[in-house]
Amino acid sequence: MSHPTECPELPATIAFAWGEGPEDHALHVASCPACAAALADQADVAGALLPLVPARRRRPVWPVVVALAAAALVAAAVALRPASPPAPAPVAEHVELRAAAPGLDAALDDLDRDVRSLELELL
Amino acid sequence: MAADLLQQRIAALREELVRFLRRRTHEPEEIAQETLVRVARAAPRCPDEASFRAFAFVTARRLLIDAARRRARRVPLVPLEGGVREPTSPDRPDAELQAGQSLALVERELAQMKPAVAEVFRLRLTTDLSFDQIARQQGVSINTALGRHHQATKRIARALREAGLIAAEDP
């Protein structure tokens, strides 16, 4: 396809092509040979390549946040305990939490136990 | 636009749209239907048949990209680097070969681009990052990221057309 002189609206056209711009930009694209050609390129290349490549989906962040928060709470509980056996290495705790995933229940049970024992000691 | 003129224009376009889409997607009827629904809803103020037709094809191309993105989430996937891992279409034995050719050509083209330009293209194609997120990742304005993507896509489109790997004809 030959490409006419480029248009200052091209960035908006690329955003529009990928659903990241206003839909009414279609009117401009329909009347602008440069933007129409750019959209044609986007559509043809996306149609040819998107089904072929692996989508590296970003994993949800919340399980990591919950696991880290749980690990931090456990570490804090252990650090605050006045006379307790040597605290487990934080790395091991983290690995254990990760190993418990996706069933986070086991990790949360550990956390509950630690918090309960801390409460008893404080009383 | 008068409703009957709109209907008349839409009916006249249907077959041409389906033919155009058949060369570009596995779901031409569905996308044609969706295109016409959207065009009818938008009822653009087009002074003549040519501008109405242009509007309809813009809508169709926009929907083609959406369809390709949906399809990318469903089909067996192959790596962008390292060739084809799985058949992309078991009922079309040539599809795997064509997929391998396309990916190899894209890799060659990307290797010849400035790294920042190639990176925008890769990120857009293989992640769910928005252009805004890609721009922030690269530390540039969103218009720069969009411009880089346009630059890369234009070059790759030309190479794929020259190799006969995507449709050359245009409405």
Image: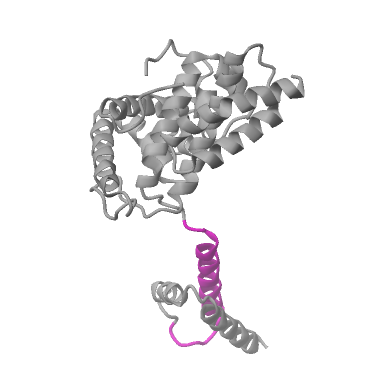
Q: List x then y, in percent, for residue B92.
A: 31, 49
* Quarter residue B74 falls in: bottom left
Q: Nearer the viewer, residue A76 or B19?
A: B19
Left or right: residue A116 compared with residue B88: right
Locate the C terminus of chain A by quadrant: bottom right
Find out whether residue A69 is within the magenta segment.
yes
* Quarter residue A2 falls in: top left
Find out whether residue A61 is within the magenta segment.
yes
* Residue drawn where x is 61% and y is 15% of the image: B49
* Residue drawn where x is 25% and y is 35% of the image: B105
Q: Give the residue furthest to the right.
A: B2
Q: Nearer the viewer, residue B72 or A72?
A: B72
* Residue drawn where x is 70% and y is 31% of the image: B41
Locate the N terminus of chain A by quadrant: top left
Residue A24 visible in the displayed image: no
Q: List x then y, in percent, for residue A42.
A: 44, 30
When the figure is inspected, residue A120 is found, relative to residue B109, above or below; the finding is below
Q: Which residues are magenta?
A: A59-86
Q: List x then y, in percent, for residue A73.
A: 56, 72
Left or right: residue A108 compared with residue B74: right
Q: Nearer the viewer, residue B147 or B22?
A: B22
Left or right: residue A108 compared with residue A42: right
Residue B11 visible in the displayed image: yes
Label the magenta part by its dominant secondary structure: helix
* Residue drawn where x is 45% and y is 26% of the image: A40
Q: How is the image coloured?
A: one colour
